[in-house]
Each structure stands twice: as C-alpha cells, then as structure tokens.
Image (cartoon, helix red, strand yellow):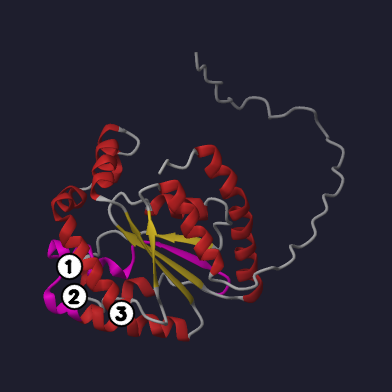
Amino acid sequence: MAKLKRKDYDEAMEPLAVELNRLQRWLAHTGQRMIVLFEGRDTAGKGGVIKAISGCLNPRSCRVVALSKPTERESSQWYFQRYVSHLPAAGELVLFDRSWYNRAGVEKVMGFCTEEQHRRFLEECPVFERQLVSDGIILLKYWLGCDQSKQEERFAERIEDPVKRWKISSIDLASRKLYDDYTRARDEMLKATHTSDAPWALVDMNDQKQGRLDAIRHLLDQVADIHVEPEAIELPALPKAASKERYPKGVPKVKRCSWD
C-alpha cells in the first residue's frame, strides 16, 4: 500500500485540528480532565502523534509529559507516585509520551526491575487506572506498532540525520536485538491491563502519517458531544499611532539572512 502523501495528510489533518480545538474548548467549559497515553515500539512515532495533537492546541491547558530516568529518591517511592503529580486538573489534557507502562516494557525487557516488581505492576495497574476513571478522568491508551524492518529503516535514518540523532539512545540500540522480547512483554501487558475501565487501542504506524490520523480520529470519537460555541470576538478599532517608527532608535536589529 502506498504511503500517504504530505499534501493528503495536511488536508486530512486540517479538520481534525479544528475538532481537537473543540475538544479543548469542551474540556475547559465542562471542567473535565483527560489523559492520553502513548506507548509502543521504538521509532513507531509517538512523538509525531503527540506533536500533531499538541501543536494546534493552547499549551496552557494541554501538557506533554515525557519523564526521564527516575532519580534515586523516585526509585524508592511507590511506583506510580511520580506520575500522580502530572495528572490533569479541571479542563486540562495531558499527553504522556511513555508513562507508568515503562515497567511493563523497557524495565521488564532490559532488567531494570525485578520479576516481583513487574508482577506487582501488572496486578496494581488496573486498580490504579480504575481509580483514575472512577474519579472522572477520561483515560485513553494507545499502543503504536511498526514492523521490525520499518524500525531498522528509521534507526538508520536517525543516525544519518543530525537533527534526529538525539532520538537514538543506548537503550534504543540495545533493544534492536530484543524485538521478540518486547513483543512478549507487550502481549503480557495487554492481557493484564486491557480492561473495560481502561481499554487499549492499537495503532499501525508503518505509515506514520496515516497512523497519526487514525489515532487522532479514534481519540476524538471516544468523546461524545463536545460542541461548545466559541465566545464571540470583535476587534475594536485601533487607536491612532503616536509614532510611525516601527522600533525605537539605538537598539540593534538582527540582520536578515541570505539564503543564496
């Protein structure tokens, strides 16, 4: 199947961006709280989906959470504790670029947690998520997948592209030989945590543009009537300018770049 062209993607994304703004306006109007988790394969495109969503929304009430390695203090806390402080308040949308499911994925496969910690996580996670949903939080969970051949292609692209090279970590490189291990960990995770309270949705990201559209369309479809009329805005007449000078004198301006 041919990959979605940029022009077609942009055309399809435009009405979705409008709907995302309606969603944000509805959250603000109703005081609802919403969490969207994005988990999945390395290079699947979690950051791209999150950027497509957050890029057209007001950052004051749409936050992206991408936590780094836990500190020594955080490692001694209740596992879910460091995530709780990032949960949304009324009217907020929080997008997790990886989440508490690190324990079911990278920590399990790379040996960063014990078997007992992993087992306990799979038991406690559905309880934790049930508490979130019972308190009124809208919780959506997406697992983004891609074939190993596509993953290898994207790893190579990141190494060659100086702008994307930062995306490659030592963990990413080590994970290349553990594709099947991550598959088994994913399946175990889905079996334990795909619940009626907080079901998973799987997104095919072999074509990242198509996958973004699919995920966003699905996200919007999970919330019922979100139509809230925007407040009317009328621009008042501008006052007469006291000066025709664009900038104050004596302050240097940045030189215009030459692209020749």
Q: Residue at x 39, y 52 (%)?
A: 47
| Secondary structure state at the residue bearing disc 1 | helix
Q: In the rendered view, tell whether residue 192 sits above or below residue 106.
A: below
Q: Which residue is mark 1?
A: 108
Determine the CA span between mark 1 and mark 3: 15 Å
Tell which circle, 2 or 3, labels the residue nearer the N-terminal end. 2
Amino acid type, residue under disc 1 in the picture: Lys
Q: Is residue 171 left or right of residue 82?
A: left
Q: Is residue 118 left or right of residue 68?
A: left
Tell which circle, 1 or 3, labels the residue nearer the N-terminal end. 1
Q: Residue at x 35, y 36 (%)?
A: 163
In this picture, which residue range is highlighted in magenta? 90-119
Q: Which quadrant of the figure has residue 113? A: bottom left
Q: In the rendered view, tell whether residue 205 sits above or below residue 161.
A: below
Residue 168 seen in render: no
Amino acid type, residue under disc 2 in the picture: His
Q: Which residue is mark 2?
A: 118
- Please tell me whether residue 112 belongs to the stretch shown in magenta: yes
Q: Which residue is mark 3?
A: 125
Amino acid type, residue under disc 3 in the picture: Cys
Badge 3 local density, few (<14 within 10 Å), some, or many (20+)? some
Determine the CA span between mark 1 and mark 2: 7 Å
Q: Is residue 159 left or right of residue 200?
A: left
212 or 235, nearer to the observer: 212
